[in-house]
């Protein structure tokens, strides 16, 4: 059994995928070829924004957004503590200071009450200038953007949507990667739509920012490719990855997103009386980058993970160390009680295999094993 079954996905898409890759090879247009532009247009259309700029990774996508806004030393950027390192790493890469915000106990996303507390504390301390909120769509579920937007307007902050895991999610009829002033996603292979290597994209409706993104991700180029007008990055998505993503986007839109939601619904129905299952608020729709349970404590989790491993059922822990406890951020000298919910989740979450190709008999086997262990 695979945690995220890319082998089965490839076997289903093999004919289309092989042709797409070989067409690029035959064209010899490997970098910034026509497939990349085609892919950018397709993803912008799917999401519902004017501009998509493809780049080398989801991390680069976040960094490019901060560069466009000239985030710099002395700036404060608010980011959830319970997330992948890249969400906070890019802040420090720009010389700014991450301010870690706790998360909601049910959705795993940014706690907007704590966000306002941290903004007020930062303003009162007077050492940093609040600039940006990075709101993460964790495990496929969009963050609470209605409340986040309200706070951004109140305090004059940009909103950067980190949709690395959220692509395909929705609030009402509006898709993830449209909720930020700039939004980003990742095409790492295990993401809802992944390529066969690293990749990412930046989304915006702002023409000026899109032009800056286009410059920054190709060495700060100007109108002449050999006239570099700013210090940029080498962060281009190659044509083979773009071709792969075009095939995968079609499958994702046609059936994968629906099918992975069926798997999640079946998990929840079978496990809701056994263990704390993920919460999707009314009006929200998840793309289920992960299906994450909450158990009683770290000891129960370790026992459950071992029992499932003995049955060849893979699991994963996202995330065992919150951002405010990462060694790399120890220089900030944070309060030990900075993000108590993030600390609790780090000891109690466990993620199950989930993907559109997970057979019902495997789903049943997983649920039965969890029920038997936790009811002991």
Image (cartoon, helix red, strand yellow):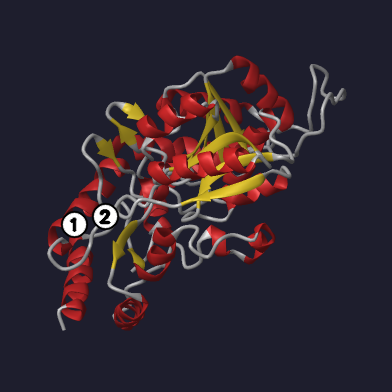
Report the front residue among 191 and 101: 101
Packing grade of label 1 (10 A; few <14, some 14-19, many >=20) is many
Task: Please name the residue that numbered disc 1 is placed on.
Answer: 268
- Tell me: 121 left or right of 2: right
Report the front residue among 58 and 126: 126
Disc 1 versus disc 2: nearer the observer: 2
Q: Are marks 1 and 2 in contact (CB under 8 Å)?
A: yes
- Tell me: 215 left or right of 173: right
Q: Quadrant of the N terminus?
A: bottom left
Query: Image height check: is 22 above or below 156?
Result: below
- Tell me: 319 left or right of 170: right
- Does residue 204 appear anywhere in the picture? yes
Give how far across and how far down residue 310 sits, in percent.
Answer: 32, 83
Packing grade of label 2 (10 A; few <14, some 14-19, many >=20) is many
- Does residue 22 appear anywhere in the picture? no
Report the front residue among 190 and 271: 271
Which residue is at 62% across, 33% downward? 65
Task: Please name the residue that numbered disc 2 is placed on.
Answer: 278
Give how far across and how far down residue 346 sits, in percent.
Answer: 42, 66
Which residue is at 32% across, 50% downward? 107
Does dot 1 land on a helix, a strand or a loop?
A: helix
Give how far across and how far down residue 144 sits, in percent.
Answer: 36, 37
Which residue is at 39% across, 46% downward? 111
Which of pointers 1 and 2 lies earlier in the amino acid sequence?
1
Q: Quadrant of the C terminus?
A: bottom left
Query: Image height check: is 299 above or below 211?
Result: below
Report the front residue among 339 and 65: 339
Does dot 2 land on a helix, a strand or a loop?
A: loop
């Amino acid at each position: 059994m695979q945690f995220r079954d890319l082998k089965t996905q490839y076997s289903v898409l093999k004919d289309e995928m092989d042709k797409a890759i070989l067409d690029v090879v035959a064209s010899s247009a490997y970098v910034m070829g026509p497939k990349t532009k085609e892919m950018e247009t397709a993803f912008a259309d799917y999401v519902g924004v004017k501009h998509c700029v493809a780049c080398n990774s989801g991390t680069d996508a976040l960094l490019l957004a901060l560069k466009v806004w000239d985030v710099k030393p002395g700036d404060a950027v608010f980011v959830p503590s319970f997330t992948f390192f890249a969400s906070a790493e890019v802040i420090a890469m720009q010389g700014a200071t991450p301010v870690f915000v706790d998360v909601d106990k049910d959705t795993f996303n940014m706690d907007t009450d704590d966000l306002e507390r941290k903004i007020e504390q930062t303003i009162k301390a007077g050492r940093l200038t609040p600039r940006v909120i990075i709101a993460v769509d964790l495990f496929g579920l969009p963050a609470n953007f209605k409340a986040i937007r309200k706070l951004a307007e109140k305090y004059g902050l940009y909103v950067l949507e980190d949709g690395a895991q959220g692509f395909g999610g929705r609030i009402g009829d509006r898709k993830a990667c449209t909720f930020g002033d700039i939004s980003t996603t990742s095409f790492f292979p295990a993401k809802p739509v992944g390529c066969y290597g690293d990749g990412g994209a930046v989304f915006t409706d702002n023409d000026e920012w899109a032009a800056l993104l286009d410059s920054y991700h190709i060495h700060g180029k100007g109108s002449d490719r050999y006239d570099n007008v700013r210090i940029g990055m080498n962060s281009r998505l190659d044509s083979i990855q773009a071709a792969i993503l075009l095939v995968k986007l079609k499958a994702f839109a046609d059936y994968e997103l629906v099918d992975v939601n069926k798997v999640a619904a079946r998990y929840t129905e079978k496990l809701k009386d056994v263990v704390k299952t993920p919460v999707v608020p009314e009006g929200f729709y998840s793309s289920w980058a992960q299906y994450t349970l909450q158990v009683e404590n770290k000891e129960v989790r370790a026992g459950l993970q071992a029992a499932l491993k003995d049955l060849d059922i893979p699991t994963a822990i996202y995330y065992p160390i919150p951002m405010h406890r990462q060694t790399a951020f120890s220089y900030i000298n944070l309060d030990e009680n900075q993000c108590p919910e993030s600390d609790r989740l780090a000891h109690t979450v466990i993620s199950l295999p989930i993907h559109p190709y997970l057979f019902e008999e495997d789903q049943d086997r997983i649920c039965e094993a969890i029920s038997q262990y936790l009811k002991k």
